[in-house]
Amino acid sequence: MNEKKLRTAFTFHQAGNLAEAARLYGEVLRGDPKHFDALYLLGFAEYQRGRFEAAERLMAEAVEVNPRSLDALYNRAAALLQLNRHAEALSVYDAALALKPDAAEFIAGRGAALSSLGRREEALGAYDKALALRPTLATAWNHRGNALLELKRCEEAVASYERAVAIKPDYPEAWRLRGVALAQLARLEDALASVERALAIKPDDADALEERGNLLMRLNRHAEAVAAYDAALALKPENIHALYNRGNALSILKRFEEAMRDCESVLSRDPDYPYARGVLVHCKLQCCDWRDFDGERGKIALALEAGKRVVSPFNHKALSDSAAEQWQCARTWVRHECPPSPAPLWRGERYRHDRIRLAYVSADFNLSAVATLMAGVFEHHDRKRFEIIAVSFGSDVKTEMRDRLVGAFERFEETRALSDAEIAAFMHRSEVDIAVDLMGFTGECRSGIFALRPAPVQVNYLGFPSTMGARHLDYIIADKTVIQEGEQVHCSEKVVFLPNCYLPNDSTRPIAARTPSRGEAGLPDDGFVFCSFNQAYKFAPAMFDIWMRLLKRTEGSILWLPECAAAAMRNLKAEALKREVAPERIVFAPFAPSTEDHLARLRLADLFLDTLPYNSHTSACDALWSGVPVVTCPGSSFAGRVAASVLLAIDLPELVASSLDEYENIAAEFAREPTFLAAIKEKIAKHREVCPLFDTMRFTRNLEAAYTAMWRRARRGEAPASFAVAPP
């Protein structure tokens, strides 16, 4: 009777009806609990159903009945590996190999257990032994690739995975992991093709879908990445990593409310999930959702103090005005995300060049704030003393600015398709004397390039207004307003103080000849126009309080802001109403078709209101270039003092308030006294032509003096040291 039932069960098993097969195997075992075939086959069915604890227990019982069954031993070990009971799996493989020492599958399985125990070099030896016995064992090639991948020997891992898929072309795991290895080599398009090959074989592979999302993120195909994460989460809703990554992708796509929901879900499961709280608070700021703002900021400060990965340095700048806290944030990021290489490329060589080889490294050589500020500097560099190289890994979309930048450099190197290691190796081969990171921790930055130390002098400049917390960055370029005496202790780099302002400007920026009417710009014909053309995440509640009080103090005035997320515009109007200000007194400016049009439109404003703790930087320069006064109150960090530096460089110290109360009073006086406003605008017009802020040539010579001093120290074999560039 049992044998007939067993044959029926096996028929169901072969047909894929695992549930019915398991039921019948169970009936056999109720009649004969020691029936080896029923124990083994039920264990195998449970393994196939993903019920690994039951599978391991049944295989163990089968081995008790027949200790010499290699199949039962093998499958018990496989179940133990799935349960992360790696030491027990290793013992079972050893028992099997005592029975059959030349069983390639068991030797390879033993390698998998060793690898999971962190004994990866031993694991490689096991895989090689298995493959010597059976070179066509695809699983061994696959597992060998895994060990090599964990050892960061990615090129060898790719080769091993390729042997696996050559033997077994329909091996989805090997195709997926080949993609993972290629991704670590920054061969992103090849990696994506490999993962998509895995999905063609197994479309419901949640791990492959998640990896596809990760690759699409790195390729800046964020909308497609969200779709990939959606598919992965539909299969594995509990996958917290895919959930966080989807939230991060949604944030980049400016779908902030959806991103907030994902981050909140992540934090409900793991309150310390790396960077989730930082992304959540950044999205809330982008939506001007200030509920529990102080509470969230406090949680982030406590987590940073404990050394936790709670927020990225970029997202942190809008949350904190503490230089010490920003330094801690940057150091934590570097330690986990881009630590210095233990094998730096540059090892003390002294290059001998006729000119200093100066490489600017960035993804922003196109329509960007950094390009707008630096274009004139690139063009004004002294070619007799400097060889200027662009190392570009960003968009190559053809624009007028892109063409201008390409023409400004002697060498414009497109490195977008290269890995960090390949870019660093190229820079080292090129004998770059000074490498300048123009991005820091912004946008599509590639901080890993500088972690490999390709150049004798490495500089943090412009893109990221704070220390990068990395010892492999030798210098940060600043001025004595943004970093004051005694504050160098909060910088990992040595500080180079430029005269006047550290921020460059292009004195050739055109402004459209025609200024639109107020009506065309959506503004009332009469009344004072306060403006703040910053991104919404800089609009802190304390500053908004002041702005609303200014509107109440100034009859008929309006606040002119840039269009932002729909949620932000909705929330700002609601916040105005809470402060007893009519929501229609906030007017949002649509995106201007060109920078020239925006600068012309800015002339309609009467006064530009700065933000804190993260100041206006390029936008403050835009306002002054257009003739609009800027009122600021300096904070306690680099990012919170830039507007003050800008104003001092155009000799307008009267617009730099010593407190927020004074900031409010200065702004109110402008609105109350038209003659005061007219006098300041006249002063701006005069100073624009003669003061350092917009003198591109003078700025470039100062910057070159800084580079020359750095280079001379390096040539003498001296360690980096802080210094100030003397004014010309």
Image (tube, grey):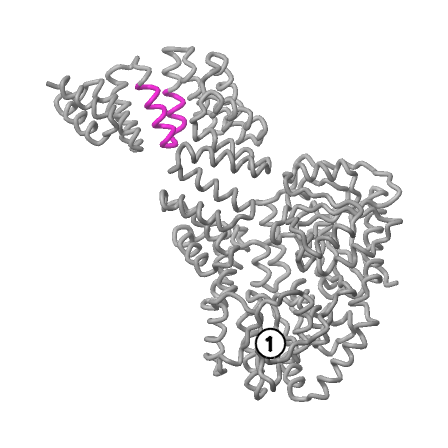
Q: Is residue 469 magenta?
A: no
Tell me where residue 174 appears, x and y as whole percent.
Answer: 47, 29
Q: Magenta region: which residues?
A: 72-92
Q: Is residue 481 left or right of residue 62?
A: right
The residue drawn where x is 25% and y is 20% is 62
Q: Secondary structure at mark 1?
A: loop
Toward which corner of the image does residue 268 lie, by quadrant?
Answer: bottom left
- Residue of label 1: 521
The quarter of the rendered structure image containing the C terminus is: bottom right
Q: Crowdedness of circle 1 by 10 Å Cα count: few (<14), some, many (20+)?
A: some
Q: Is residue 83 magenta?
A: yes
The answer to whether residue 705 is seen in the rendering is yes
The residue drawn where x is 82% and y is 54% is 706
The residue drawn where x is 35% and y is 28% is 80
Q: Is residue 186 left or right of residue 620?
A: left
Vertical side of 599 occupied by 163: above or below: above
